[in-house]
Image (cartoon, grey):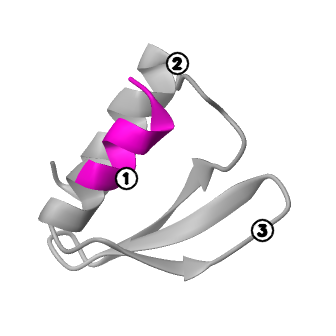
Amino acid sequence: MKLSELLKLFSLNNIRLIQHGKRHDIYYSPLTNKKFPVPRHAKEIPDGTLKSIKSDAGI
């Protein structure tokens, strides 16, 4: 999945950006009440990483 597609999915589920980092951005999900990192410069997110991000986001 592309990062842009993931960010659109975040906006539909009210997941918001908390902090910019050099390599990762930190997002917060009100669905799971968790903060989690997302690779900032990746154009294509690997499947294992995507599964972990979606799990933390509650999607």
Residue 36, image x and y in percent?
A: 49, 62
**View extreme (top): residue:** 47
Mark 3 and mark 2 lie on one chain; the one further toward the N terminus is 3
Label 1 crowd bin: few (<14), some (14–19), many (20+), radius 10 Å: some
For the record, the magenta segment spans 1-8
Q: Amino acid at mark 2?
A: Pro
Instruction: State whether residue 41 is above or below residue 28.
Output: above
**Helix, strand or loop under label 3:** loop
Q: Nearer the viewer, mark 1 or mark 2?
A: 1
Q: Nearer the viewer, residue 44 or 33?
A: 44
Q: Quadrant of residue 19?
A: bottom right
- The residue where tag 2 is placed is 46
Mark 1 and mark 3 lie on one chain; the one further toward the N terminus is 1
Q: Is residue 50 left or right of residue 54?
A: right
Q: Is residue 7 magenta?
A: yes
Residue 7, image x and y in percent?
A: 37, 52
Look at 52% across and 18% down and name the residue there.
46
Q: Are marks 3 and 2 in contact (CB under 8 Å)?
A: no
Residue 49, image x and y in percent?
A: 50, 29
Q: Nearer the viewer, residue 6 or 57?
A: 6
**Tag shown at residue 7:** 1
- The residue where tag 3 is placed is 21
Look at 57% across and 69% down and name the residue there.
26
Q: Amino acid at mark 1?
A: Leu
Q: Amino acid at mark 3?
A: Gly
Look at 14% across and 62% down and name the residue there.
12
Q: Are marks 1 and 2 in contact (CB under 8 Å)?
A: no
Q: CA distance from mark 1 to mark 2?
A: 15 Å
**Helix, strand or loop under label 2:** loop
Look at 63% across and 63% down and name the residue there.
25
